[in-house]
Amino acid sequence: MPRSKEIQEQMRTKVIEIYQSGKGYKAISKALGLQRTTVRAIIHKWQKHGTVVNLPRSGRPTKITPRVQRQLFREATKDPRTTSKELQASLASIKVSVHDSTIRKRLGKNGLHGRFPRRKPLLSKKNIMARLNFAKKHLNDCQDFWENTLWTDETKVELLEGACPHYIWRKSNTAFQKKNIIPTVKYGGGSVMVWGCFAASGPGRLAVIDGTMNSTVYQKILKENVRPSVRQLKLKQSWVLQQDNDPKHTSKSTSEWLKKNISMIAKTFGKIPCGPTRQKLNFLESACPVTSGVKVTQHFRKRTSYQQ
């Protein structure tokens, strides 16, 4: 049976107006040229919902029932690395056929969204407790203490972007425009190790590490960069040097060098302990202004040295 033509809203409103004037179904049908069943349906809808406009339609029933939805949520929560394709296969095993995009949308409505996992050091329970104790120990330190702490560390900087995936905004059919691609080179673009520091007032000096770093190289970097950074950042004489427990930082020769040289710069020299077993606190990885100055992107071949 062919679908009947929808009555315009203006006509439905006129039906109600005539009905409110006291006319019956037959009189309204004859006056407006409508079938009596159509007039009755319009009036019944108005009496029930108080309107003659089209109500939201339910559409096709969803294939994902509340029970299936709970199963999806349970599997995705149990193993966050489960892909939507794997969830799709899991539903297929119970004879529920849905597109993987439908699964992603349904999980999104329940608060589960696809995200790149954060990278964090693999820590033992002992080191987790050491970090927690470190945080508790300094929880009530005054603001002046933190503002006069010089944070130092080393980090690796990729010479070509692409080591860390990220999104871009582009229009359709512009995927291969120069601004929308990440250039790659054979055998990788290389990387460079840098030492850097920063305080609450901003980033300090940045030093490129040539070759293998040992205690002697580390002490040379401190000698050339700590004093200028302290002056640049305008730290008070009671400033504190922070470093992690890398063996090069805690070796006997480095400890003696720090006591002898740093105490000449600062009125009071101190070091914030970071916990046992070479606990790594790489603040430079999140201190973008510190390392952004040495990132090389599309002009790598024009550079003649890492320092450039």
Image (spheres, helix red, strand yellow):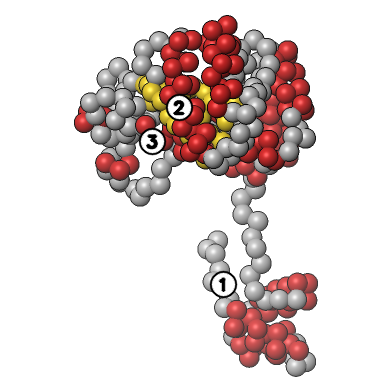
Q: CA distance from mark 2 to mark 1?
A: 80 Å
> What amino acid is found at the position of numbered circle 1 in the picture?
Glu
For residue 293, the mark is 3
Q: Quadrant of the N terminus?
A: bottom right
Q: CA distance from mark 2 to mark 3?
A: 16 Å
The image quadrant that residue 115 belongs to is top right
Contact flag, marks 2 and 3 (Cβ < 8 Å):
no
> What amino acid is found at the position of numbered circle 3 in the picture?
Gly
The residue mark sitting in front, 1 or 3, is 3
Q: x, y (%) of residue 250? A: 58, 11
Query: Going by the image, does 123 lie left or right of 8?
Result: right
The residue mark sitting in front, 2 or 3, is 2
The residue mark sitting in front, 2 or 1, is 2
> From the viewer's perspective, is residue 35 above or below residue 222?
below
Give the residue displayed 78% in from the left and 72% down from the top. 48
Contact flag, marks 2 and 1 (Cβ < 8 Å):
no
Mark 1 lies on a secondary structure that is: loop
For residue 6, the mark is 1
Q: CA distance from mark 1 to mark 3?
A: 66 Å
